[in-house]
Amino acid sequence: MCALAPTRYAAQIEQAAGPLLFVGDTPLSELFVAFQQHTNGAINAQFQYTNTLVNSYTLRPMTPKQVEKCASTPTPTHADSITPCPPTQASGLPYEVNTHHRLHNMYWTIPFSQYVSHPTRPLRTLVLSTGSHLWKQHVYSAVLDGCKTPGGDADAFKPFKSLDLGSDYGCDFFGIRYPIMVQNVARFIANSGFTGHVVFVTTPPGARGCASVASPLAPRPKREEHSGSLYLGEYFPAEHYTNQTKYAEIIWRTAFLKWAPRVKLSILNITHLSEMRADALIPVEAGGMFPQESCEAFCFPGMPQIWSEMLLRLLEQYHFHN
């Protein structure tokens, strides 16, 4: 296992960076647990689980009031400025799971808003990760010009297969939707009054067939392609987030420079380092239409401890060496 030099004064670094809020999915939660271990419990930090940062249809974060309205009234009128609400229940479809697009992913704006407005200890550091499942399966976002479906808002959050649009539906491509999403995240953070430090953590790659990799630096098995599949986010390389990391970094920097100039943005790239450690992934047996096992979670302890040390070094540089 490759490792950085031992992190000294980790608890002091965490205290100087706090209060901190981590917002992301499973890989970021693994980083957060390692961060807790390095900092004697991370007493100044909180974690909020989410699969994506935005309403998958509007490509915008939802305010706490919007989340509350959608939770109490799943089908509000257009006057509520929520068009439309993300689903609250599982789809129940084996071919199109909607976990990554449901309302619970929008809850992160509630603690964020509370911490930003705290009277004595406002939020200083926000650690974000969009997750690797951002583009899976559903036909989002139909509100974009040139992307509207025949039913408009009525088609929102419907199973992609039911709309019969074909597997080459252009609105799901990374280059169209990702910049808009990041721009809206930057504007939301700026409008909240937050002026602290945002750390965008890139997503580590998964690799099907990882059980066959036995040593560091070995090539990752290629992701199996399914021609004609409707699982866009899973099988189309142009849309797979981890294959677009360098492009994503440019998008985040550009968006924050324009829309949140008072916010300091740092990018923690854990993607390329993690690509070298397919042997450290946990193979999970698959079945049905997926002949190869899924490998998306890393062994623990292992790579998450390296990510945590990298984050601590970044925070140390920001708070003690600027």
Image (spheres, rainbow, N blue to C red):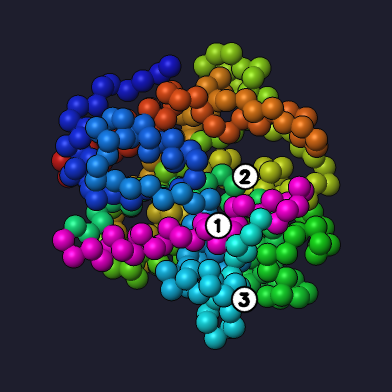
Does residue 258 appear in the picture of this structure?
no
Q: Amino acid at mark 3?
A: Thr
Q: Can you say whether 93 is above or below 211 in the image?
A: below
Of labels 3 and 2, the one closer to you:
3
Q: Amino acid at mark 2?
A: His
What residue span does the magenta drawing correspond to?
91-120
Q: Amino acid at mark 1?
A: Tyr
Q: Is residue 223 left or right of residue 282?
A: right
Dots 2, 1 in contact, CB < 8 A: no
Disc 2 designates what residue?
240
Residue that appears at 64% across and 19% down: 211
Residue that appears at 52% across and 22% down: 280
Instruction: Bin the neighbour count of mark 1 within 10 Å (Cα to Cα): few under 14, some 14-19, many 20 and up.
Output: many
Q: Position of residue 153 (x, y in %)?
A: 68, 75
Of labels 3 and 1, the one closer to you:
3
Q: Which label belongs to residue 178?
A: 1
Q: Can you say whether 231 is above or below 110 in the image?
A: above
Does residue 152 appear in the picture of this structure?
yes
On the image, which quarter does residue 234 sit in? top right
Q: Which label belongs to residue 75?
A: 3
Q: Position of residue 54 (x, y in %)?
A: 51, 61
- From the image, which quarter does the C terminus lie in? top left
Q: Position of residue 82 (x, y in %)?
A: 55, 76
**First in sequence: mark 2 vs mark 1:** 1
**First in sequence: mark 3 vs mark 2:** 3
Kind of element beneath mark 1: helix
Instruction: Kindly report the distance in space between the C-alpha atoms of the residues bearing marks 3 and 1.
Output: 26 Å
Instruction: Bin the neighbour count of mark 2 within 10 Å (Cα to Cα): few under 14, some 14-19, many 20 and up.
Output: many
Kind of element beneath mark 2: loop
Kind of element beneath mark 3: loop
